Amino acid sequence: MDDCVFCQIASGAIPAKVLYEDDQVMAFHDMNPQARVHVLVIPKRHMASLAEAQDSDTAVLGQVMLVCAKMAQECGIVESGYRVVANTGRSAGQSVFHLHLHVLGGRSFDWPPG
């Protein structure tokens, strides 16, 4: 999608501090971090949110989760703990309508969130 900022990042049209990239998934630093470590992991193919996921998306969704774990490992937050968040819809806080998971760590988190 031409007007989607994450699609533009995935295509290289908008620069990002990329930490990981393969043919299906990309991970990069969040421009507005909410923790010491705040990485976004996206599928390169546009999908507005998790609500649009289909059975045919199983492989890419699995790869997104594996990359989240890889980013936590590479960023050194596995031992202290980290949170993976997918906001779906405006009321849940989704502001960019391209599926993305937040990998957050390096600080304490409360429960329940929000």
Image (cartoon, rainbow, N blue to C red):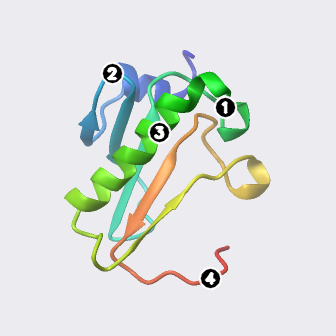
* Residue 21 placement, left or right of 44: left
- What amino acid type should be assigned to the residue bearing mark 2? Asp
Chain-order first, disc 2 or disc 4: 2
Q: CA distance from mark 4 to mark 1?
A: 27 Å
Q: CA distance from mark 1 to mark 2?
A: 18 Å
Q: Residues within 10 Å of mark 1 (few under 14, many from 20)?
A: some
Q: What's the mark number on residue 53? A: 1
Q: Residues within 10 Å of mark 2 (few under 14, many from 20)?
A: few
- The residue drawn where x is 38% and y is 80% is 107
Q: Is residue 71 visible?
A: yes
* Residue 68 placement, left or right of 109: left
Quarter of the image with the C terminus is: bottom right
Q: Position of residue 67 (x, y in %)?
A: 35, 45
Q: CA distance from mark 3 to mark 2?
A: 14 Å
Q: What's the mark number on residue 23? A: 2
Question: Secondary structure beneath disc 2?
Answer: loop
- The residue drawn where x is 67% and y is 80% is 112
- What amino acid type should be assigned to the residue bearing mark 3? Gly
Q: What's the mark number on residue 111? A: 4
With respect to residue 85, does 80 lie above or below? below
Q: Position of residue 21 (x, y in %)?
A: 28, 32
- The residue drawn where x is 57% and y is 21% is 3
Q: Is residue 30 visible?
A: no
**To which quarter of the image does residue 19 belong?**
top left
Chain-order first, disc 3 or disc 1: 1
With respect to residue 20, does 39 lie above or below? below
Question: Secondary structure beneath disc 1?
Answer: loop
Name the residue tied to disc 3: 62
Query: Which residue ends up furthest to the top in the rendered image?
Result: 2
Closer to us: mark 3 or mark 2? 3
Chain-order first, disc 4 or disc 1: 1
Find out whether the residues at labels 3 and 2 contact each other: C-beta distance under 8 Å. no
